Image (cartoon, rainbow, N blue to C red):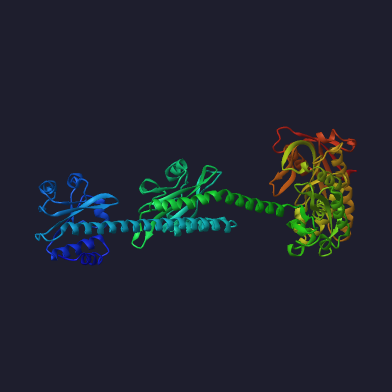
Amino acid sequence: MFDLSELNFILNKKKSFKGKISLLNDFLFNNNIEFQVYFFSKNFIKKFEVNNLFYSEKINFQKVFNKFPHKIINQKVIDYLNVFEKSNFQKGGVISALFYKKKPVGFFYLFSNNAKENLFSYSQHISFYFDSFFKEFNLKLKLKNRTTSFQKIMLEIESIFNITELLNSNVDNLSELHQNILLYIISTLNASKGILLIKDINSGTYEIKASIGIKENSLNKKMIRDSKGILNDLKTDNKSKIINNIKDYALSDFSELNCLASPIISQKKIHGSIIIYDKESRDGLVLFNDSDLRLFDNISKKISLSFDNILLLDSLKESKKSIDNIMSSISTGIIKINILGEIEYINSSAKKVFSFNSESVIGNHYYMVFEKNNNLIRLIENTEQKKEVLFESNFDIVDFNDSKHQINLTISPVFDDDNEGSGVVLSFEDLSGINKVKSTFKKYVSENIVDELLKNETLLELGGSEKEVCVLFADIRGFTSLSEKMEASKVVYILNNYFQAMIDVIFKHNGTLDKIIGDELMVLYGVPLKSDNDSQNAVNSAFEMLKELSVFNKKMSNKGFPELGIGIGINYGKVVSGNIGSDQQMNYTVIGDNVNLASRLCSVARAGEIIISDSVYENLKNEEAFKSCKPIILKGKSKPIKNWSFNNNKT
């Protein structure tokens, strides 16, 4: 016999159930007591790692024990227990049931040849001990599971806080935000790599906005759509998922074991996706499980909730950028003054006109900014008081460098949502460039035509239309051979003086100088504006050009230059007129057969001669100055051309 305290001492030496069974078996064997343990629960054997003990699924627990957990073996019991191979149950032995979570999982058997051994008492004590052990084990397991669950919940809460902070702190840089979101998810879930895709609203395709752990040349360059594959599944289910069948999808092909995929949902529609691949552990890659999926899904849902805000902020950012670009590119100067009189905004054109820089203007009161422009200050004050739009044309201002400008100025009051005044906006157009253009343009076209064109801008649109125009060509005769005998500087000098004299005459008669071709002038009458008699204006110009040339030759002769002779050809008829070229550069000209005819008439005109076509002659008031000439056969014409001639040398 042995003391039960010895038994307790032995059982407490080992912590595991398997260890306790082994020590108990040795202890009882040394005390001449046979000890065997039998199980009929595979889950129990697996949980407590007692695979080397007897196992049988055939035993009928109810028949063996009935309602009693401890039983002295009789023949009937022995018959029931014969299902266990290599067993040797004997009468007088004791069997005791083992329970785990109130369910029978097995029993143990005690037997001794010593009749004095109190096997029943030993059995009860061992059974009570293991019952307590199982209860303690189960409580520890529950505590461990709850601790693990609590840790997971805390991780989820912490993850939500962290991702929220991340979403709020990087909205100014969307590209960096995408990368940081993906990095955080991969770090939190111990993934080895991942991608973040966002749907392009216009094309419907998905763009990879961020990737980690995947080589760029491994990324699919084809268009990614949600019509099939993982994205189609996410669009249909609208929930995160574990993908184990990785070879079935193109986007999961980066994975070796499995991957997690989650949709980014906005207004019940998929706008993107996050996919992470292969969970890492100390032992290498492992599978993502349901716990990982839940954490991943919670983070993704938070991202989805913030997605509208991200898009809105990005849209506002792009809109602001677009507005700034537009305001910077327009030629109109814009200055915004708030209710306190401080300069709140100034665009590039305004800075240029006033020679300002942003640092010296933004935040300062307009009294200080426009201290050199008292009249402008007065107009701003009037607008602030009267709350009415004010317009001033050809308004004089002085810039920061004391240079003077003229502007067309509009000052408009600004109102808030409550219709209360909240400042004024100055918009103005710098007239310096326009005045310069006018001055330059008038060197090419008569002043009254310039003014008319500036009044009606549609006359200067790219394109052409058919019009009746009178075309004049004037060419210096023998100038090529003449210029070969002169120095280049002298050739330029005589040409410039000649053109100045001729163009003054042309503009005097409302002619439009089309172009200068070497020593030849091409002049238009009737475009862009018609007169009462364009043919008469052209002929009058030709007459005066010959007279002016005579004066010019006398001046040049006195300076040692040779005299010039010109031939003039004029034709009237339908041509295509307009701005020919591109939006960046265009040339106002005329084209057509009637233009070519005028050029050919000029080519046959001798020095001092004006040759006009029949269509010009019919419109003249002084047609008696011309005499009819023999029809001219011109290249490209099937019939001789009727013409009229005036020869200055014969008058």
Q: Position of residue 36 (x, y in %)?
A: 16, 57
| Quarter holding residue 8 | bottom left
Which residue does the image show at 75% across and 47% down from the upper left?
Answer: 417
Q: Is residue 487 visible?
A: no
Q: Is residue 187 left or right of residue 607?
A: left
Q: Is residue 158 visible?
A: yes
Nearest to the observer: residue 646 or residue 117: 117
Q: Is residue 272 left or right of residue 382?
A: left
Q: Position of residue 74 (x, y in %)?
A: 11, 49
> As displayed, is residue 25 above or below residue 435?
below
**The N terminus is located in which quarter?**
bottom left
Which residue does the image show at 19% across and 63% down from the upper left?
Answer: 24
Nearest to the observer: residue 622 or residue 206: 206
Q: Position of residue 467 (x, y in %)?
A: 77, 36
Q: Position of residue 522 (x, y in %)?
A: 78, 46
Nearest to the observer: residue 554 or residue 4: 4
Q: Is residue 527 left or right of residue 28?
A: right
Which residue does the image show at 25% across and 65% down from the upper left?
Answer: 14
Q: Is residue 552 left or right of residue 520?
A: right
**The C terminus is located in which quarter?**
top right
Nearest to the observer: residue 300 or residue 526: 300
